[in-house]
Image: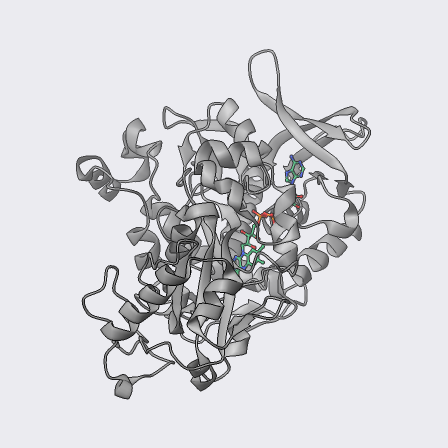
Amino acid sequence: MSDNSNSLKFDLVVVGCGISGLSAAVTAQQNGARVAILERSPKEERGGNTRYTESYWRMQSRDSVSADFEEQLIANSGGYPDPEITQETLRAYNEWSPILKALAFTDPELISTIAQEAPLALKWLESFGIKFDFLPNYFINESTTRMAPIGGGLALVETLAKYAETVPSDITFFYNTAAKSLLNSKNGEIIGVSAVNNQNLRLDILGDAVVLASGGFQGNPEMQSQYLGTQAVYTRPVARGGYYNRGEGIRMALDAGGSPAGDYGSFHAQPVDPRSGEQEPIVLTYTYGILVNKLGMRFVDEAPTTVDASYESRTREIMKQPEGLAFAIHDGRLDDIPNWKKSIRSSVPPIMAETLSEIADKINVDTYSLVSTIHAFNNACPEPSNFNPIHVDGLATQGLLPNKSNWSRVIDKPPFRIWPIIAANCFTFGGIKVNTNAQVINMDGDIIPRLYAAGEVVGLYYRNYPGSTSVMRGAVTGRLAALHFTRLQN
Ligand SMILES: Cc1cc2nc3c(=O)[nH]c(=O)nc-3n(C[C@H](O)[C@H](O)[C@H](O)COP(=O)(O)OP(=O)(O)OC[C@H]3O[C@@H](n4cnc5c(N)ncnc54)[C@H](O)[C@@H]3O)c2cc1C
C-alpha cells in the first residue's frame, strides 16, 4: 500500500459519500486500504440522493433479487441494439469485440453480476447492524417484490459514515470539497483528483485509484438542458440531495475517454406536486382519475398497468406538455379506493371544486375544453361493475385517443379533487460504461486503469427504470470497485 508520509496521498480516492461512495470506501478500508472520501456537501447533508430515499431493493428475499429482475433490466437495456453485435455476448467477455465492450447497452454480464452480488451487498450492510425487511410503500398496486432497510437510505449513509469515522487513520472525509478533474501523471496515468473547497481553493488529492461515485447530473441545469431538452427547465430534483449531483464525475470519466452508457436523454421521472416543498411529494392516485394538460386535454393512457410499472413513462409525458404541467382530476369516487392517501405525499391539500366548470376556473384552463374532455371521457367509460382498485381490472375506455386501459370510471360526482403534477428528476440515466469490476471502459472497449465508476455514474438504464434497483446498483458497484482495487494492491 502507499507511503503514508504525505497526508494528501491515499491508496484510494472516492468522490461522493452516497451509498456507492461509502460502500467503496468502507469495503476498501476493510481490505487494508487508506481512503479519502470527497463530499461536496457539508457533513450534516452528506449522502446525496441516498440520504433521502426509503431505499427499496428489488428483492424477493435476503438471498435473491426479484423474480423479474434480470428480465426487466434486459427488456430496458437499450434502444434497438444490433443483434449482429449483441450475439457476441454469448462468448466469453474477453472474446467480445471492442465495439461490443464499449456498446451503449446494458450488458448481460453486468446485469447478472448485480443480481448475484445484491444479496451479498445486503448482508454486508446487515453486518453493520442495518436490518432489511418487506416494508410498506406508497403503491396501491404493484408488479414486483421489494425489501428496504429499516431507517431507509439515511440509515445506510449514517451507519456507514459513522463506521468510517471510527477508523479515522484509514478513512479521511473532505467535506465541502467538490472534485473537478482527474489528475494525470506525465504519461497519462490517473493519479488522483483535483478538487475545490468552499473557499474556492484548489486541493489535489492523490491516490493509486479513483472511484467516481458522485451521482448523476440532476442538479446541473446546463447538462439537463443539453441532454434532456429544453422542457427540463420545468423539472427539479425530487429531493434535496439531488441538487448536489452536478455531473462532474460523469464529465471526468468522459474527459478521460470513458465510453458513455445509459440513456443520456432520459431520467427517472416521478410525478410530484410542484406546490409542495416536501421531499418526494408524489401524487400517484391519477390512475383512478384522468390527467389533463393546461389546454384541458388528455394526452396519455393514465393506467396502462400497475402504477409502479407505469408512472415513470406517464411522468415523462407530463414533462412534454405545455409548461411541463398536468392536473390529476378525481371525483368523489376517489374515496372508494382503500388507503388512497398513502399515494399522495404532497404537503399541500388538493384544489377542491363542486362542478366541472369550477375545476376549470380554479386551474385556469379553458372551460369548454376541459368540460368537453371530461364528457368525452365519461361517454367512453364502461360499466364499472368489475372495478378493482388493487389489481389491473381491464376497465378500459373505448373510442378515445388516447384510451385509458384500467380503472376507468365516470368523473361526475363532487367533490372534485385536483392536484397539479410536474416531472421531478430522481436521477439521470446517462453515465459511464463499466465492466463487472466497475472499471471504466474507454471508447475502444479497453479498461482505463485506476479508474472506477459506481452508482448513478454508471450508465445502466434505458427507456424505463426497473424500480428499486438504483441503491443496490450503488452498493454493488461501489463494493465491486473496492474489492477489485484491493485485490490488485494486495
Ligand atoms: C426521494 C428518493 C427516493 C428514492 N427511492 C429509491 C428506492 O426506493 N430504491 C432505489 O433503488 N433507488 C431510489 N432512489 C434513487 C437512489 O436513492 C439513488 O439513485 C442512489 O441512492 C444513488 O446513490 P449514489 O451513491 O450513486 O449517489 P448519491 O447518493 O446521490 O451520492 C452522490 C454523492 O456525491 C456527492 N457529490 C456530487 N458531486 C460531487 C463532487 N464533484 N465532488 C464531491 N462530491 C460530490 C453528493 O453530494 C452526494 O453525497 C430514490 C432517490 C430519491 C431522491
Please state, as top left, top right, bottom left or bottom right, where the C terminus lies in the image. Answer: top right
241 sits left or right of 464 in the view: right
Q: How is the image coloured?
A: one colour
Q: Can you tell which quarter of the image residue 195 is in?
A: top right
**Residue 134 location (% of width, % of height):** 52, 75
Instruction: Confirm whether residue 432 shows in the render.
Output: no
108 vs 354, left or right, is left
Specify whether 474 is left or right of 390. Answer: right
Q: Please, which residue is most extreme toward the bottom here?
A: 385
Q: Residue at x 49, y 69 (%)?
A: 358
Residue at 54% of width from left, 50% of height from top?
Answer: 474
| Residue 35 visible in rendering | yes
Residue 9 vertical position relative to residue 75 in the rendered view, above or below: above
Task: Please give left or right for residue 156 compared with residue 394 in the image.
Answer: right
Q: Quadrant of the N terminus?
A: top right
**Residue at (79% x, 24% y) in the render:** 201
| Residue 244 horizontal/vertical position (percent) | 65, 42
Q: Position of residue 118 (x, y in %)?
A: 48, 58
Residue 293 in which image quadrant: bottom left
- Residue 62 percent across, percent down from the top left: 49, 70
What is the total number of numbered labels drawn onto the structure image? 0
Taking depth in this image into account, of 452 and 178 the one nearest to the observer is: 178
